[in-house]
Each structure stands twice: as C-alpha cells, then as structure tokens.
Amino acid sequence: MAPYTRRDFLGCTAAVLLARSAGAGTSTEGGTTTGAESTPYAYGYVGTYTPNGGGIYAFRIELASGALTQLQVVDDIRNPSWLALSPDQTRLYAVSEIDDYPHPGAPGEAPVVGGGALVSYAIDPRSRRLTRLSAVASGGSTPAYLSVHPSGKFAFAGNYGSGTVAVFPIGADGALTAASDVRPSVGARHRGHASDEAPGQFAISDHEGPHIHMVAADPSGQFVIANDAGLDLTLVWRFDAQAQRLLPAEIPVVAAPPGSAPRHFVFHPNGRIFYNLYEHDAKIAVYDYDPSRGVLRFKQSLSTLPPKYAGSNLASEILISADGRFVYTANRLHNAIASFAVLADGQLRALADTWVHADSPRSLCLDPTGAYLYSCNQKSDSITSFHVNPATGVLQFTGRYEPVGSPASLCVLRLSGP
C-alpha cells in the first residue's frame, strides 16, 4: 500500500456526504443588491473541496454583525481550493486542484489529459453573481494557489503536485490565456519532520519532492516569490512583464530549516517586512525586504503555538491587518488562531491563542472593515467568525457558524458604496 501523504490525511472529513438540493447552482437571494441598501454589506466568495463542498459560494456579509448570507453556488468547477480577485474587483480567479484536466496538446497532436486548471469568472457589479469566462491548464498538477499581479494583467499559479510555478497573461476581458512561462523548483530533499518542530509532532509532511504552496508578486510587482513546502525553499524571481516570464533574482533561493515546509507569506503594508509561515514546525520567519532588489534578510523566528505546547500541528495560514498592526496565523490540529502585535521594527510579539470552535482551520480572512475575522474550517464543514478588538487585535468568537462543505479559502470584495 502506498504511504499516506499529508494532503491525504488533511483531506479526510468526518462529515457524511449529503445529497444536494435541486437548487444547487442557483441564486438564493431575494433580488439584486446595490450600494443603496439601508444596511451596509460586503461580498465574499468561498472556495471548497468537492464533492463535499458544492463549488464556489457567493455570500453577502452584513458588516454590522459579520453574518453571512448565501447568494449563489457555482458548481461548474472541481476543487476550487484557492480564489483570488482582480485588483479592480471585477473578476474572480480560481484553481481547480485536480490532476486530470483535459487540454489541447501540441499543434497536430491529440488532446492531453492531466494536470490542473485555472478558471476565471466575471463578477456582476449589481448582484455579485459569477459568470464563467475561461479555463486553462495550470502548467502542472494539483494547483494549490494562484494570485494576480498588481497590474491585473497576469496571474501566477503554484502547482503543488508538480512543484511548478506558471505565468498566465490575462486578456482585456479578464479571461486567462495559456501559460507564457513555467518554472520548476529543484533542490535537495529533506526529511519528513522538521529539525526544530514542537515536541510530540506526529503529523505527516510531504517532503518526497517539490511542492509549491504559494506564489505572489511583491507589492511593487517587480518580483515574484514562491514557497516550496516540499523542498523547504523560498524562491525569488524578477518579473519581466514585457517578456511575460520569470528571471532569477539577485538571491534566487532562501533556504528554510530542513523539514519546516514554508507555506504562505504576507508583506507588511509598507512593503519592507516579509512574514513567512512554516507549516510543519509552526513558526513565523520575519525578514526585512529590499523592494529594489528583491532581497530578504532574516531578523526573527517565533512559534505560532502556545508556550510548552506538545502534540501534532500543521500551521496553515497567515494574514496581516490592513493597518499593519496585527498578524494572525491558523494552526490545524491545534485548531486555534494565534494573534501577534507588530512592533515598530516589524518584529512580532505574541498576544493570544483563540480556539476556532471547529476543526482544521485551513485559511483565514478579514472583512473589508477589519472588524471581523473568518476561519474556513475544512474538516468541520463550517466557517466561524470572530470580532477583532481594534485596540488590542484580540479575537472574540461571535457564536456564528456558516455551514459550508469543506471550505478552503475565502476572499472578500472591497467596499464600493454606502
């Protein structure tokens, strides 16, 4: 029998697959919505793992309470496990985390079945409903992440299964075109457990080969950074927009501790501090960042777990508040959110550890006002919400649960009206 991988382990869910209602894929809203409503709303989209999840869910967010109201389910995509919005908020992009996507072969050759896909959708400016625009091969297998360049003219995909990063030009209509560049990740393999992990770690980590877990441009758009959780590397490229390709940066590879599995990262709003979350040892590495050269300089490492914690854990997500004052990370298996204060020099100080009231928080998201934080709890089939104390950054559970099958990621539109 083949050994279980970390993703096999985390993909399990205790929920029984329930029959979906005949209305899947249709709107449940009572009419179109506009910015002139008496109660201010925001709008968000949730990506899920299918078939337990129904696809991509559209929600209306009541800013006064943080409550979510489901508006639409788009069921024309498998495993839309990561979503990203265009800078102008008119398009939504999704990975299809699969490895059997049928796509055209080379000229004169038969179609090829294999690899993952990326799908783009138009967002209706009134109803916020989604309409499919395009689908393209992801440049590798089982894509786990995609992001959009600050210009809105390119998307970047990180293919977890094949360990490749791909560049995709975006047309004027928001549709994706075929990859213009695909870059593999290479390096030495490491052991499956981190050299500096918390005591009692039994969770599995995939270190049998390269596994890209995130790729995104820096705030300036001049450089593109990717985390390889399989080879414990952070990769840095200079982005040539004219040639539509990635070129090695001055320091193209930053090594993480063996077995630590770099997963997700965020930049401080000032663009000069870089926070890198390591999945398997549950630590944040803080770097100074030179935006003119794309160079990272290490300055701090600290745990996302409580003092004296022992047991299995896999850190999953990191985000920073819009004002740059607070950082939050999710810990799966420990099932909690760690809160940190950002100090004057960008280093972090631990604040609190908050139970998510559910199982396996895969990703986190703040609402557009910063008043509420949402946790997508993959193995509990729920999204839980927390009020954010604006003075201290500490979280308080709202008592609300939104039932969603295998939620993986949530992104929200900026406010555009009263």
Image (cartoon, rainbow, N blue to C red):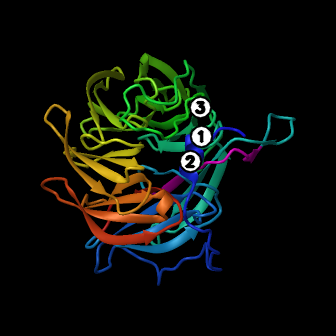
In terms of sequence position, does the residue under pointer 1 or pointer 3 come before the other?
A: 1
Q: Is residue 222 above or below residue 308?
A: above
Determine the residue positioned at 52% across, 43% down.
145
Contact, CB < 8 Å: mark 2 with mark 1? yes
Q: Which residue is mark 2?
A: 9
Of the two numbered discs 3 and 2 in the rendering, the one whose residue sits closer to the viewer: 2
| Mark identifier at residue 163 | 3
In terms of sequence position, does the residue under pointer 3 or pointer 2 come before the other?
A: 2
Q: Is 397 displayed left or right of 192 in the figure?
A: left
Determine the residue positioned at 42% across, 63% down.
44
The magenta-colored residue range is 90-103
Q: Nearer the viewer, residue 302 or 132?
A: 302
Q: CA distance from mark 1 to mark 3?
A: 15 Å
Q: Which residue is mark 1?
A: 5
Judge whether residue 412 can be spotted in this image: no
Secondary structure at badge 3 equals loop
Crowdedness near tag 2: few (<14), some (14–19) or many (≥20) residues, C-alpha within 10 Å: few
Q: What is the x, y in percent for residue 202?
A: 47, 39
Q: CA distance from mark 3 to mark 2?
A: 20 Å
Secondary structure at badge 1 equals loop
Amino acid type, label 3 = Gly
Q: Nearer the viewer, residue 84 or 233?
A: 233
Determine the residue positioned at 36% across, 49% down.
330
Determine the residue positioned at 32% across, 79% down.
37
Q: What is the x, y in percent for residue 203?
A: 48, 41
